[in-house]
Image: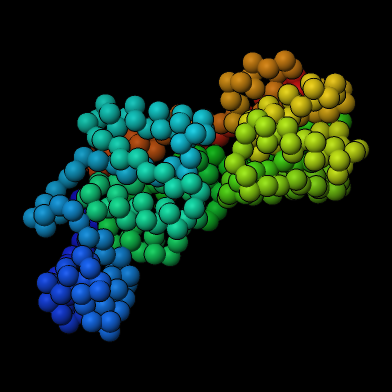
Amino acid sequence: MSGVHRRPTLTDVAQLVGVTKMTVSRYLRNPGQVAAKTAERIQNVIDELGYVPSRAPDILSNAKSHAIGVLLPSLTNQVFAELLRGLEAVTEASGYQTMLAHYGYDPQIEERRIESLLSYNIDGLLLSDRIHTPRTQRIIASAGIPVIEMVDTDDPMLYPVVGFNNREAAKQMVEAMLANGYKQIVYLGARLDTRTKLKQQGYQQAMQEAGLEAHSVLTEQHSSFSLGSELLLEVLAQYPNCDGIFCTNDDLAVGAVFECQRQNIAIPEQLAIAGFHGLDIGQTLTPKLASVITPREAIGQNAAEQLLANLEQDIKPKPMTDLGFQIARGASI
């Protein structure tokens, strides 16, 4: 494929360090078998080159594996399950295997997972986050394979991206709540990953432009219905005049609805509730949950199509593909 850099080899590392390939190989197998100063020089060169040891013979290092690496931050989040379904519909039909890795929203773990995937000589990478460690970026650059990020199109972007603008989607949802007369709106966030923070920024912008004070209740815990219930109780205790809540996802929002029902709080008369992603459970609630409808499956499909077009026809992915979103007002606002 034109424009792709050669992946660093064991020979490259050995030559830059000034030792034999056998010495480098010995270090990779057991660093304790190599003198400390030599081991330090070897590791420095490995980090500089972004070298990843291959489990395949060197003679196969330039052959196609017909495997795509997919990095997902969560295996239980329905959003990423639907994204995976969309991309695998494309890869499976094209004869490509997906090699899935989970990293729990941790950039350091993502780095290790990417290094492991590259050792299997994958042909391309689909990433689910915008924040990567410097070493991850060096490893990817050295691999010379196409990479596409998925889900968020907000700047800055290191690689071509397919998704939608989380910040703008959150802003428009809060504006819809404000247009319905709610003024004391509180933002509920969990995980505190990049997307949660972008949604918070959109919420804050909408409130500030309306001349209103913004308040957030945040936690690093993972989202769940029970957490949504807990956060609602916290909101009611901290902000008794609150008349609306905007949640970073539908899990929290649905949990808040359930707690309102237990507390006999009328929705939306006493409290408006809005979520994010338009999950099926929220759309079947009574009252129907207001939410941002996001194209998860379409994002996976489009990202996989662009990646395979790059691999098969050398067609470069678009710098940005924004698939948009919809504001579903529901009956909960």
Does residue 299 appear in this view? no
Check the image and name the residue furthest to the front.
32
Whether 55 is drawn above or below 295: the answer is below
Residue 273 screen position, x and y as percent: 76, 29
Which quadrant of the structure image shows residue 285? top right
Q: Which of the image's four quarters has the C terminus?
A: top right
Check the image and name the residue furthest to the right.
241
Residue at image position (8%, 55%) is: 59
| Figure coloring | rainbow
Which quadrant of the structure image shows residue 263? top right
Residue 275 screen position, x and y as percent: 68, 31
Number of numbered discs visible in the structure rendering: 0
Residue at image position (12%, 77%) is: 20
Residue at image position (88%, 26%) is: 270
Residue in the foreground of this view, choosing between 315 and 280: 280
Q: Is residue 166 left or right of residue 115?
A: right
Residue in the foreground of this view, choosing between 232 and 297: 232
Residue 37 screen position, x and y as percent: 28, 84
Does residue 17 appear in this view? yes
Which quadrant of the structure image shows residue 251? top right
Residue at image position (59%, 31%) is: 277
Residue 76 screen position, x and y as percent: 49, 34
Whether 325 is drawn above or below 188: the answer is above
Residue in the foreground of this view, choosing between 180 and 61: 61
Q: Is residue 107 left or right of residue 48?
A: right
Q: Is residue 97 left or right of residue 249?
A: left
Q: Is residue 46 left or right of residue 65?
A: right
Check the image and name the residue furthest to the left.
59
